[in-house]
Image (cartoon, helix red, strand yellow):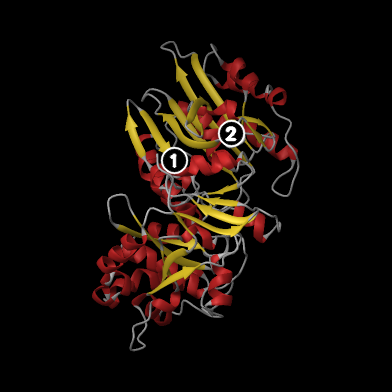
C-alpha cells in the first residue's frame, strides 16, 4: 500500500468557520482552546474530568453511509488533535442572527431551568443533541440524555419541564444545524482528503493516521506512543494527573475500526465502536448489556468512549471486560500486517499489564450471543446509580442440564482483583451440582479462594467480598423465580 500523504495542519469547522491549525500541543484540550484562543466563554470548566457536563459541546462527524451525526462530548477531556474533519458546535452558535434565542434556550428561560447559570450551557447543548435526534422525547430519554449534566442550584424538575416543551416552540426550519446540514456534509467531505496529519516535532508531536493500515504502520514505527480513541480515561491522565502522554496517535476518526456485524450468533465489534454506537446491537442480541451500557458515564462519555479502549486500558474496574469474559469473547490484536486472536480473559495478565506486544493494538472483538436457553446477567454496584465508577461488577452465564444441574457456568468480576478475573473456585463448586439455594450458598464460601479485594475510596474490602457473594445469590433468585430484577430505576421497574 502506498504511503499516506502527510498534512501538517489540523482541519475542522468551528460553528460556521473553517479552522486550520499548525501549532497544536498533543495534550491541548478542546475546552482550553475554545476559551483561551477563541474566547468562547459559554463552554465552562467544572470538573475537568467529564463528570459534570458544564463543558458540553456538539461534535458533528460524517458516518460511513455519508450522513452527518452530532453528539454531545466533554470538551474538557476531548483533545483538539482528535477533531480533524469534524464540526465543533458551541452554545454561541445556537442563537439566531437577529438575537432570538433557540427553542432549547427559550424553553430553559421560560421554565426557569437556570439559576446561577454556570451549568446551563452544558444542559442546553445536551438537550439540543437530544432534540435533534428525538423532537418529542420521553421522560426516560430526557433523563438518559442528562445523566452527564449536573446542576447544584436549580433542581432538575424545571429542566425536565423545559425539555418536554422544546418542540412546542417550533424552530426546526430555522435551526442552524438542521438548515445547514447538506451544506455542512459537503464541507466536511471536502476536508476528508485522506491524508495523515502530523503536527509537532520529536517527542512533542501527534499523528492522526489516514486509515487503519496507516495506523498500524505508525504504531509499529513508534510503539511507545499513546493511542487515544475516546480519551475518556487518557483525558484525565492530563487534566488530573498531569502526565506526559506524548507522542500521541489519535484514532477516533478511523471508520474501519467502527464496523459492527452479526453473523452466526457472533457480534463482531471494531475496537473504535463507541458505547453509543454499540448499544442498539448489543442490547438487541444480549439484553443484559443495554442497562449496563447506560450506566457507563453520562451520554457525553458514551459518545466518546470505545469498547475497544475499555478493554485495551486493562483497568480492574472497567465495566465491559467482566461481561465480555463471561460471554466468552475474544480479542484480535494487530501489529503491522500481522494479527492474532486470543480469548479475552487471557488478555489481562496483571495490574497495568496486558498480553500486548510493543506496537500491537486491539483491532476488534468478537462476542458470542448466548443461546436462548442460557441465563446471562450483569450487576454493577456503585455509590450512586448513574455516572459512577464501579465498586464491584459481577457477570454470570449459566447453562442448566435437563435434570436441573449446572452444565456450564462462567462468573467474572471487576473491582475484585488487579484485573478483570473469573471466579474459578466458585465455578468449580457449582459445576455439575443442582442449581439450588443450598448449592449456591455453599459455593459462596469459595469466593475467598478466588479474590482478595482491596479497600479504596469506592468500597472496603469487606464490602466488596460481601457484595460479590450476594450477587451470586441474586443471580440464583432471578433465574429460579418469576421475580423481576431488583428495582434500580422507575423505568426498569415499569
The answer to which image quadrant residue 127 occupies is bottom left
Q: What x and y, as percent, mark residue 114?
A: 50, 78
Q: Is residue 118 above or below residue 443?
A: below
Closer to us: 113 or 31: 31
The answer to which image quadrant residue 17 occupies is bottom left
Furthest-bottom residue in this view: 98
Residue denoted by label 1: 213
Q: For the residue labelled by badge 1, is the local secondary structure a helix, a strand or a loop?
A: helix
Residue denoted by label 2: 471
Label drawn at residue 157: none
Q: Is residue 424 left or right of residue 10?
A: right
Distance CA(mark 2)–CA(mark 1)? 43 Å
The answer to which image quadrant residue 180 occupies is bottom left
Q: Is residue 279 left or right of residue 464?
A: left
Cβ–Cβ below 8 Å for labels 2 and 1? no
Q: For the residue labelled by badge 2, is the local secondary structure a helix, a strand or a loop?
A: helix
Residue 319 in sight: no
Given this view, does label 2 or label 1 mark the residue nearer the observer? Answer: 1
Closer to us: 39 or 306: 39
Q: Is residue 147 above or below residue 101?
A: above
Q: Is residue 74 above or below residue 445?
A: below
Name the residue: 42% across, 65% down. 12
Q: What x and y, as percent, mark residue 440?
A: 59, 22
Q: What x and y, as percent, mark residue 289?
A: 45, 39
Q: What x and y, as percent, mark residue 128?
A: 38, 68
Residue 257 in sight: yes
Location of the N terminus (image quadrant): top left
User: Label 2: how many residues lie within 10 Å, few (<14), some (14-19) or many (20+)?
Assistant: many
Closer to us: 163 or 128: 128
Name the residue: 44% across, 40% down. 213
Of mark 2 and mark 1, the one earlier in the sequence is 1
Q: Is residue 98 left or right of residue 52?
A: left
Amino acid at each position: 500500500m502506498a504511503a499516506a500523504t502527510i498534512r501538517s495542519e489540523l482541519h475542522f469547522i468551528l460553528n460556521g468557520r473553517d479552522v486550520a491549525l499548525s501549532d497544536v500541543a498533543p495534550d491541548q484540550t478542546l475546552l482550553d482552546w475554545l476559551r483561551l484562543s477563541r474566547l468562547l466563554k459559554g463552554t465552562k470548566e467544572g470538573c475537568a474530568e467529564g463528570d459534570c457536563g458544564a463543558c458540553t459541546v456538539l461534535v458533528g462527524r460524517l458516518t460511513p453511509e455519508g450522513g452527518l451525526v452530532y453528539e454531545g462530548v466533554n470538551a474538557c477531556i476531548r483533545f483538539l488533535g482528535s477533531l480533524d474533519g469534524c464540526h465543533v458546535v458551541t452554545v454561541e452558535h445556537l442563537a439566531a442572527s437577529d438575537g432570538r434565542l433557540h427553542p432549547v434556550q427559550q424553553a430553559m428561560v421560560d421554565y426557569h431551568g437556570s439559576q446561577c447559570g454556570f451549568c446551563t450551557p452544558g444542559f442546553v447543548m445536551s438537550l439540543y443533541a437530544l432534540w435533534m435526534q428525538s423532537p418529542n422525547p420521553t421522560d426516560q430519554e430526557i433523563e438518559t440524555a442528562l445523566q452527564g449534566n449536573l446542576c447544584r442550584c436549580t433542581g432538575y424538575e424545571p429542566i425536565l419541564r423545559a425539555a418536554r416543551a422544546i418542540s412546542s416552540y417550533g424552530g426546526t426550519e430555522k435551526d442552524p444545524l438542521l438548515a445547514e446540514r447538506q451544506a455542512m456534509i459537503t464541507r466536511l467531505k471536502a476536508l476528508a482528503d485522506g491524508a495523515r496529519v502530523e503536527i509537532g516535532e520529536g517527542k512533542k508531536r501527534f499523528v492522526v493516521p489516514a486509515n487503519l493500515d496507516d495506523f498500524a504502520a505508525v504504531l509499529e514505527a513508534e510503539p511507545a506512543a499513546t493511542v487515544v480513541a475516546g480519551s475518556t480515561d487518557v483525558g484525565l491522565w492530563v487534566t488530573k494527573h498531569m502526565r506526559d502522554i506524548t507522542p500521541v496517535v489519535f484514532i477516533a476518526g478511523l471508520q474501519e475500526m467502527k464496523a459492527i456485524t452479526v453473523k452466526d450468533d457472533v457480534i463482531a465489534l471494531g475496537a473504535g465502536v463507541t458505547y453509543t454506537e454499540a448499544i442498539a446491537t448489543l442490547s438487541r442480541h444480549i439484553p443484559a448489556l443495554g442497562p449496563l451500557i447506560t450506566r457507563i458515564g453520562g451520554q457525553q462519555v458514551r459518545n466518546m468512549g470505545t469498547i475497544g479502549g475499555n478493554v485495551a486500558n486493562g483497568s480492574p474496574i472497567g465495566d465491559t471486560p467482566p461481561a465480555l469474559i463471561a460471554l466468552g469473547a475474544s480479542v484480535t490484536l494487530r501489529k503491522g500486517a500481522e494479527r492474532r486472536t486470543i480469548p479475552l480473559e487471557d488478555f489481562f495478565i496483571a495490574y497495568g499489564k496486558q498480553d500486548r506486544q510493543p506496537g500491537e493494538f486491539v483491532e476488534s472483538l468478537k462476542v458470542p450471543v448466548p443461546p436462548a436457553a442460557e441465563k446471562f446477567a450483569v450487576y454493577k454496584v456503585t455509590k450512586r446509580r448513574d455516572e459512577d465508577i464501579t465498586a464491584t461488577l459481577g457477570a454470570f452465564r449459566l447453562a442448566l442440564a435437563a435434570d436441573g444441574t449446572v452444565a456450564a457456568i462462567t462468573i467474572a468480576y471487576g473491582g475484585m482483583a488487579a484485573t478483570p478475573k473469573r471466579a474459578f473456585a466458585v465455578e468449580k463448586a457449582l459445576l455439575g451440582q443442582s442449581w439450588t439455594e443450598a448449592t449456591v450458598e455453599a459455593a459462596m464460601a469459595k469466593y475467598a479462594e478466588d479474590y482478595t479485594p482491596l479497600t479504596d475510596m469506592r468500597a472496603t474490602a469487606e464490602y466488596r467480598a460481601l457484595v460479590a457473594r450476594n450477587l451470586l445469590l441474586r443471580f440464583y433468585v432471578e433465574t429460579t423465580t418469576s421475580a423481576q430484577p431488583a428495582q434500580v430505576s422507575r423505568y426498569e421497574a415499569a
